[in-house]
Amino acid sequence: MSENSYLPSKQEAQAQLERINSSALGRSKNQQKLLEYLLNRELESKDDGHSESYIPKEIEIAIDVFGKSSDFNPTDDSTVRVNISNLRKKLENYYSSKGIKETFVITIPIGGYRLVFKKNTEVNPVNTASASARKEDKALTGYLKPTYVLVILLVVSIVVNLFLGFYDAGSTPKLAKTRAKTHLLWADLESSTKPIMVVLGDIYNFSEFEESLNRRRTILDTNVNSDDDLQQYLAKYPEASNITMGFRQKLVNKGSVIALKNIFNLIDDKKRVNYRIASELTVYHLRTFDIIYLGPLNAMGILEEYFKGSHFQVDKHNLVLANDDLTKRYSSPQNITESYIDYGLFAKVDGPRNNKIYIMSGFSDPSIMQVSWYMTNNTDLWSKEFETLISDYQLSSLNNFEMIFKVPSMDGVDIKHKIIYAGTVDSSAIWTSAE
């Protein structure tokens, strides 16, 4: 159970509550009532001298906040769970944007109905990219949140292996920095004064306890890609009461990690680089960093906003990439143990604050690896194929555009590629919510 590391006074809590209500919750009276109720219960339990906070039950919240009757049945009515999930997300968005300078933050740990207060160690009094980057660096090095540990370990593992593979003791590096970073495609990243953030897509999963086997199992379900999806599933199938949200992990696929090797060749040694998983990406990061995304199409987090300006949309439930008029539909491979066709996406677009966002994605590992390789190596970037493609599709600026790759694969390994589509992207339609 998460414990409060900081307990604000009633005056501090009330003042912040008013700020949250006026900006993050807006006209949502239910959300306002819910937050005020949970806040009062948390503070009252401390005033009463309890060593541990009182955790309100779902039925208590249903009756006290939403006016449900005493015969309220949580298995038939998901009102409380859905509102808690929505409130949790709105709080996260508030502290990553308008509330970034609050002295303390309020969180709702997944799996419970209590508030947790924490001192905001990421308060940023200086509104500059460099100061923001120093805070970001401190957040990743001074203290590591548990959800970052897996990604950091993976990154460290890759870096160590690259070092051992490309360096001999007492010798100069075998792998020189490639010319790829000087190509027009990556020149903006090279000349930018903004820090870089490499984002790895993490796959949503949950767990269930199987009593007959006395085992807890991790579940990956293409129809469940968020807390809201899971809440809706539980509401529809109340018999699935053995599913627990509190045992989630952040899973990063192999292709994303391998693709990191290609990205390292683009980044100048003097550049400040941060790493984050997509589910932890916020509006603050979108406005502050040049971003490189590596990962599956259904694990992009807030970067899914990209598709507002794209000619394609992703059906995350059926794993289909389709264009606006549905004349082109590309499906995720069903059987990856034999030969199959995978599809990948590359995009480069303007971010909301004069920054650049690069996306290298696909349905599975082969497409992510192939896209990242093709778009970062000298041979392909300066090839006749690429030059002809850019000319044919009139993409000479190499900005605000997207490309679709067809990637024949076998047993999880990319064999070759074919670029089957290229076109422009309307970046002005993408970041309306991040301005």
Image (cartoon, helix red, strand yellow):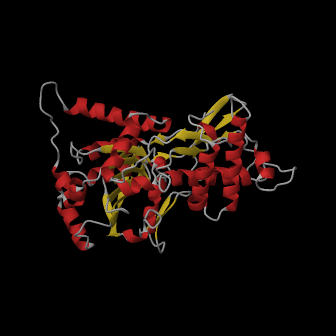
Q: Position of residue 152 (x, y in %)?
A: 39, 36
User: How far across and how far down the image is residue 58, in percent?
Assistant: 75, 45
Residue 221 in the figure: left or right of residue 275 = right
Against 57, residue 432 (above or below) is below
Q: How many marks?
A: 0
Question: Residue 151 is drawn in which quadrant?
Answer: top left
Q: Is residue 61 left or right of residue 247?
A: right
Direction from residue 250 to residue 243 in the image, left or right? right
Q: Quadrant of residue 390?
A: bottom left
Report the residue that reaches farthest toward the left. 171
Work out whether residue 412 or residue 69 is closer to the camera in this orientation and state it.
69
Q: Work out which quarter of the rendered image holds the N terminus and state it.
A: top right
Residue at the extreme top of the image, as rendered: 169
Is residue 226 among what the camera can see?
A: no
Q: Position of residue 64 (x, y in %)?
A: 79, 51
At x 61% / y 56%, what residue is drawn?
A: 18
Residue 374: x percent and y percent?
A: 27, 53
The answer to whether residue 75 is seen in the rendering is yes
Q: Is residue 253 left or right of residue 31?
A: left
72 or 366: nearer the viewer? 72
- Residue closest to the eye, 406 or 111: 111
Q: Write the residue at 65% across / 41% down.
A: 111
Q: Residue furthest front?
A: 11
Instruction: State which quarter of the image contains the C terminus.
Output: bottom left
